Image (tube, helix red, strand yellow):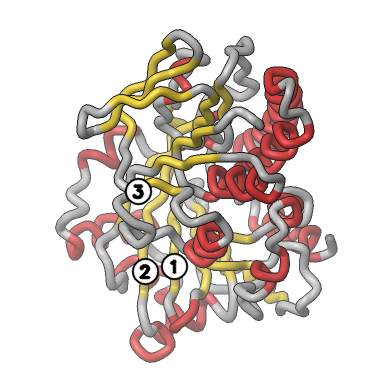
Amino acid sequence: MPTPITIVGAGLGGLTLARVLQVHGVDVTVVEADLSPAARAQGGLIDIHAYNGMVALEAADLIEEFESIVIDGAQHNRVLDPDGSVLLDRPDWGEGTRPEVHRGELRRILLNSLAEGTVRWGRKVTGVRPVDGGFSLTFTDATVEGVSLLVGADGAWSKVRGLLTDARPAYVGRGFIETYLHEADVRHADAAEAVGGGSLFVLGPDGQMLGAHRETGGTLHTYLTLTKPEGWFAAEDFADSQQASVRVAAEIEGWAPGLVELITGSDTPLIPRPHYCLPIGLRWDRVPGVALIGDAAHLATPDGEGANQAMLDGAELGQAIAANPDHLEDAIAGYEQAMFTRSYEQASQAEMFQKNSRTSQDLVDALTQMGQG
């Protein structure tokens, strides 16, 4: 029998790994800090890509379930200038390679695909250390459990990562301000018109980038990227929603009213999300009995690839383990080398895109190219 595996973290990557392992009859347990699947919101829409996310779902034998949650029309893309001028308005023809789904719905189908009891909720890991023959996990209630094969799927601030490397995420000089507008077609007509039927992108003159997409029920979900010192996000009082929205809206003063309303009209408190990343090309020497996937292994700045890469990590690691259960170290080492190369290439491309001077036409060209394949 294969060595039982413990995964720390029930995000998309960890759940994909668990599902692929179970498809192949491998015993696995997932420990998760959340008290239940509904303990917190899972974010908005994500697009799943043919070359990574879809590959992972195929390995998990969940394509049919995935297709049932795809949102029709969500691949409609618009690019506006800050003054509201339309530079691109490309309808969703139903032939794109990046179908959009709710992250929470995708997590739901992964959870539902697992054997009952696979995920142990309310198990927040506070410490990990090597012991003879494996590792010990310490939880918030002070209990300690032994683990023989451990996978860290525990995100940006991974506890498991410390077994392999001292690398820590570093601030990259910018971050999101996140907002939600509900019943937008009725209550926020200008903002709804600006966003259109799918996703909206606006590039500002001072490095601002506004992205918004339409979710079910008329909700508009917006991310405004600002280049600021790390302390700016902590110093702003986002608990005072009205004042925070005024201060953030000042960063896009003079933009079209419908675009500004995506900030000032938020029906929820503004959420600051400073961006961090691990060193590009991070590698580590092989440590027997432990592996990393997703942000725990290769946290990068948001570029639409994070969830897709995490799911592919989970699928590839699961397939490697299932294919070579009697030589798990060889299986994990092979996975790591492929993951190192793949994540380096993706992070390098994202960094190059961020560093290069971008124009609205660059956005139009990039989205047009995506729509063609």
Q: x, y (%) of residue 323?
A: 78, 34
Residue at the (54%, 25%) spot, across then down: 149
Viewer-closest of 352 and 92: 92
Q: Are the residues flagged by discs 3 and 1 in contact, CB closer than 8 Å? A: no
Q: Nearer the viewer, mark 3 or mark 1?
A: 3
Q: x, y (%) of residue 367?
A: 72, 61
Chain-order first, disc 2 or disc 3? 3
Residue at the (63%, 12%) spot, across then down: 286
Tag shown at residue 221:
1
Q: Secondary structure at mark 1?
A: strand
- The answer for how far apart the CA atoms under marks 3 and 1 are is 28 Å
Which quadrant is the C terminus positioned in?
A: bottom right
Q: Quadrant of residue 74?
A: bottom right
Tag shown at residue 357:
none
Q: Amino acid at mark 3?
A: Trp
Q: Residue furthest bottom?
A: 186
Identify whether 265 is placed above or below 250: below
Q: How crowded is the residue under tag 2: few (<14 C-alpha within 10 Å), some, or many (20+)?
A: many
One can see residue 87 in this view? no
Q: Are the residues flagged by discs 2 and 3 in contact, CB closer than 8 Å? A: no
Identify whether 194 is placed above or below 243: below
- The answer for how far apart the CA atoms under marks 2 and 3 are is 28 Å
Report which residue position mark 2 lands on.
180
Q: Are the residues flagged by discs 1 and 2 in contact, CB closer than 8 Å? A: yes
Q: Amino acid at mark 1?
A: His
Tell whether 34 sits left or right of 305: left
Q: Quadrant of residue 333?
A: top right
Q: How crowded is the residue under tag 3: few (<14 C-alpha within 10 Å), some, or many (20+)?
A: some
Q: x, y (%) of residue 237?
A: 17, 49
Q: How crowded is the residue under tag 1: few (<14 C-alpha within 10 Å), some, or many (20+)?
A: many
Q: Amino acid at mark 2?
A: Tyr
Report which residue position mark 3 lands on.
121
